[in-house]
């Protein structure tokens, strides 16, 4: 059993069984990462192309390492230094990569739907590494792995996702993945940053951070994009952090030993206080390790099994 | 040359005629409507089982020429119109350069008649450069042949400019067509705001972006007593405002597009850019209310908003791709299937929305069948069921979300000025 569909575009594609398989596989992969010699031959002769239209450190690096730890050939395309700046369309860029023999194209794009579009043009498999406000399935999977490893399952957990929900692909993918696995997801942020229809997607919505935190087992803080202030979604960073910063005092409302997650990069003193980010309840660094493990699992399930 | 349309069901909404009769055409004009007309020297066209209607009029198309010939030309647009069963089309002014001067109006008119297929009526711009700042030379546009003015695609943001346009056009009796959109609310959006925009992560455009401007323009029409026509209304709120305006006796008319009457925003979940259109596809309730408004006649005409784009333009990321659907060659079957087959609207009333409705909006002496009148005729086979095949479109724009879908009720003949320009879906001559 692997990933059935050609491309991994969103959490909507994955049922409970597939999520469990990925997380289980990732747990095995994590053992490789913890070894002294981090190299297995599983994907020798396979090629992975990272096509990133948006800046990214951790997602791109972790896909790169995930591929390399399994002996795949991985290359990164920085679109600001490629023919994209000459006006090449996504279709043509994708076709070129396919012609060069890419087995998997990992794409990060600022516009929702771009990975789906790319996938429809290519025979190569496509993994969505984040598209606009739409989806970021590998982030959701690594968050879920972190939760599963530390809380032993999802059923009945209260997970609060707090911040800019409107512009967050992380929130959307986590909402889908976590509700599929039986968790109760609360979404919280200022009314200007809450899109319509979230209840229909199975979320509880509140503007009140205290309500979201009350008894939470997991808190996922979202990065606030500083430029959103310019477009009037909130009046100032100062007021935002007064209302939505996760600090010691607010954290006390959550369940004791509640997990604190953040997709990074964090804005210290804006959405999360430095003290909380560095506390033992913070799993932000563990998330990063799990990011590599989950991506290894996906590359393995999408490349390593068929025909081997 | 004489033609005899034999055995069809003649439906003429203007006179209320709905009867199986023959119709004779001589020298481009209708010379006889009656039963069992003798064949004589006339060429007989057997239209038994078909509906013979006045030529359909589309008050809102984009022909792209001059400036956008990769997407459509006046010739290919006219071919698409003829194939789609239309005998008259009104062309929006958003060409490059735009139709804010009589030169472009003349060009569109002349190339339209050179195409020799359907009647092309140019629409002039409201403002110079369609920039919404100073009103264009509307008098010259009118004299050159503009049947209406619109800054289509660019809403007139200044209420003052819109007011003056509605006032000034009273001199000529032509309508001002409003593309109603508050661009500060819609900016950057690429689909309807709601559940689906949240799921898909695309920036939404709220219904209110349309309704705010519909409300403003209705109030300005009241103030000026000018003639306002609302292009492509798409929301329940716009319908309510329209009802309010008509009850108050304000001169306002409106059109609805086949795609807004058929499809909802759920369609966008494919991320197919062929579903991207402005105003965007709306929710179920909006579609429902829009259908009711068209059935009632509150919205008096159907307009395609035919917006052809070549493949490269639509093969972009959803939020980057241009808005628009190539609609001329699917409008009649979509409406027939949606409103007649599924919603039981009467044949006569549907035909009225394509003929008397648009003729009334644009003050045209067209859209009816009468002895001595020019023979512009659309023949429909109400039972013909066919699949849409975009690759076979005459239009350069194959951008339709309906490719492969099947609809019932297709035009099978288009006659313009007594000349058969389309028969069985194929152009003639």
Image: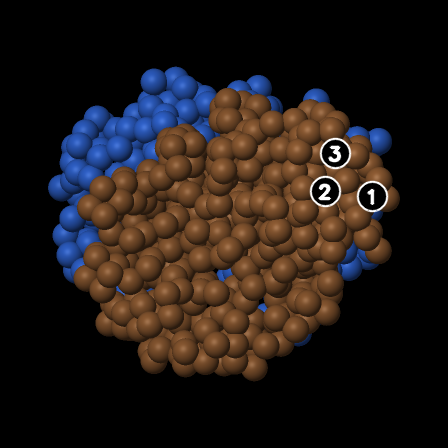
Chain colours: A blue, B brown
Picture layout, residue B129 above or below residue B283 = below
Q: How many labels sit on residues?
A: 3
The location of residue B53, given as percent across then percent down, is 61, 39
Q: What quarter of the picture does the C terminus of chain A occupy? A: top right
Neighbour class for label 1 at 10 Å: few (<14), some, many (≥20)? some
According to the picture, the residue beneath numbered tag 3 turns out to be: B37
Tell me if label 2 and label 3 are in contact, CB under 8 Å: yes
Label 1 sits on residue: B42
**Answer yes or no: do the residues labelled 2 and 1 have beta carbons within 8 Å?**
yes
User: Which residue occupies 33% across, 58% down?
Assistant: B228
- Crowding at dot 3, Cα within 10 Å, few <14 / some 14-19 / many 20+, comes out as some
Q: Position of residue A80 (x, y in %)?
A: 59, 70
Residue B159 percent location from the top left of the image: 25, 67
Q: Give the chain of mark 2.
A: B
**Mark 3, secondary structure of its residue:** loop
Give the side of residue A246 with respect to residue A159, left or right.
left
Mark 3 chain: B
Q: Report the side of B66 relative to B124 (left or right).
A: right
- Callout 1 touching callout 3 (CB < 8 Å): no
* Residue appearing at x 33%, y 72% in the figure: B171
Q: What secondary structure is found at the residue carrying circle 2?
A: strand
Say which element carries label 1.
loop
User: Does the image show residue A218?
Assistant: no
**Earlier-in-chain disc, 1 versus 3:** 3
Q: Above or below — where is B230 with respect to A35?
A: below
Residue holding disc 2? B24
N-terminal of the pair, mark 2 or mark 1, is 2
Question: Could you classify mark 2 by the number of other residues whose Cα lies within 10 Å: few (under 14), some (14-19), or many (20 or more)?
Answer: many
Chain letter of disc 1 in the image: B
Q: Is residue B382 above or below residue B298?
A: above
Query: Of B326 and A83, which appears nearest the observer?
Result: B326
Query: Rounded to the nearest whole Å, what is the CA distance between mark 2 and mark 1?
Result: 8 Å
């Amino acid at each position: 059993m692997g990933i059935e569909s050609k491309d991994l575009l969103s959490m909507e594609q994955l049922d409970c069984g597939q999520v469990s398989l990925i997380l289980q596989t990732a747990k095995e992969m994590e053992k490789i990462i913890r070894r002294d010699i981090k190299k297995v031959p599983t994907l020798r002769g396979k090629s992975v192309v990272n096509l990133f239209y948006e800046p990214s450190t951790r997602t791109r690096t972790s896909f790169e390492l995930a591929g390399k730890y399994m002996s795949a050939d991985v290359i990164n395309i920085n679109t600001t230094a490629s023919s994209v700046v000459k006006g090449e369309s996504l279709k043509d860029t994708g076709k070129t990569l396919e012609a060069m023999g890419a087995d998997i194209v990992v794409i990060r794009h600022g516009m929702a739907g771009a990975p789906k579009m790319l996938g429809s043009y290519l025979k190569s498999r496509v993994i969505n590494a984040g598209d606009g406000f739409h989806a970021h399935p590998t982030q959701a999977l690594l968050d879920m792995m972190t939760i599963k490893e530390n809380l032993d399952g999802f059923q009945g957990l209260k997970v609060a996702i707090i911040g800019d929900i409107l512009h967050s692909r992380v929130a959307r993918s986590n909402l889908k993945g976590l509700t599929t696995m039986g968790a109760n997801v609360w979404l919280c942020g200022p009314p200007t940053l809450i899109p319509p229809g979230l209840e229909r997607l199975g979320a509880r919505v509140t503007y009140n951070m205290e309500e979201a935190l009350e008894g939470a087992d997991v808190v996922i803080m979202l990065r606030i994009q500083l430029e959103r202030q310019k477009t009037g979604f909130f009046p100032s960073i100062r007021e935002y952090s007064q209302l939505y910063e996760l600090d010691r005092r607010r954290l006390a409302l959550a369940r004791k030993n509640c997990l604190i997650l953040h997709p990074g990069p964090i804005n210290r003193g804006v959405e999360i206080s430095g003290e909380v980010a560095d506390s033992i309840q913070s799993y932000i660094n563990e998330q990063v390790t799990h990011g590599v493990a989950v991506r290894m699992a996906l590359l393995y399930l999408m490349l390593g099994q068929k025909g081997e | 040359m004489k033609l005899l349309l034999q055995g069809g069901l003649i439906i003429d909404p203007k006179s209320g005629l709905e009867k199986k009769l023959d119709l004779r055409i001589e020298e481009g004009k209708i010379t006889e409507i009656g039963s069992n007309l003798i064949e004589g020297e006339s060429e007989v066209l057997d239209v038994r089982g078909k509906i013979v209607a006045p030529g359909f009029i589309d008050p809102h198309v984009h022909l792209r020429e001059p400036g956008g010939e990769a997407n459509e030309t006046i010739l290919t647009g006219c071919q698409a119109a003829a194939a789609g069963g239309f005998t008259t089309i009104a062309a929006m002014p958003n060409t490059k350069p735009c139709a804010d001067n009589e030169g472009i109006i003349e060009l569109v008119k002349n190339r339209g008649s050179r195409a020799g297929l359907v009647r092309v009526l140019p629409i002039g711009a409201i403002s110079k450069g369609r920039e919404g700042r100073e009103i264009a030379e509307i008098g010259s546009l009118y004299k050159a042949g503009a049947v209406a003015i619109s800054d289509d695609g660019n809403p007139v943001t200044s209420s003052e400019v819109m007011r003056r346009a509605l006032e000034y056009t009273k001199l000529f009796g032509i309508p001002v067509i409003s593309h109603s959109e508050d661009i500060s609310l819609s900016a950057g959006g690429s689909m309807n705001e709601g559940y689906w925009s949240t799921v898909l992560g695309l920036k939404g455009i709220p219904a209110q972006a349309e309704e705010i401007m519909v409300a403003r323009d209705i109030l300005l029409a009241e103030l000026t007593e000018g003639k306002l026509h609302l292009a492509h209304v798409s929301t329940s709120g716009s319908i309510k405002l329209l009802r309010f305006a008509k009850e108050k006796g304000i001169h306002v008319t409106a059109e609805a597009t086949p795609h807004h009457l058929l499809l909802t925003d759920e369609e966008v979940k494919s991320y197919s850019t062929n579903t991207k259109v402005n105003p965007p596809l709306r929710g179920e309730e909006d579609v429902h209310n829009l259908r009711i408004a068209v059935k009632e006649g509150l919205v008096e005409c159907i307009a395609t908003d035919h917006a052809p784009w070549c493949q490269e333009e639509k093969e972009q990321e959803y939020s980057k791709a241009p808005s628009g659907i190539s609609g001329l060659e699917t409008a009649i079957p979509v409406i027939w299937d949606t409103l007649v087959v599924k919603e039981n609207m009467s044949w006569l009333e549907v035909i009225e929305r394509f003929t008397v409705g648009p003729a009334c909006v644009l003050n045209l002496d067209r859209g009816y069948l009468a002895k001595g009148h020019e023979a512009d005729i659309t023949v429909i086979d109400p039972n013909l069921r066919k699949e849409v095949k975009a690759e076979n479109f005459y239009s350069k724009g194959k951008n339709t979300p309906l490719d492969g879908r099947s609809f019932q009720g297709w035009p099978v003949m288009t006659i313009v000025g007594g000349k058969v320009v389309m028969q069985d879906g194929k152009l003639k001559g």
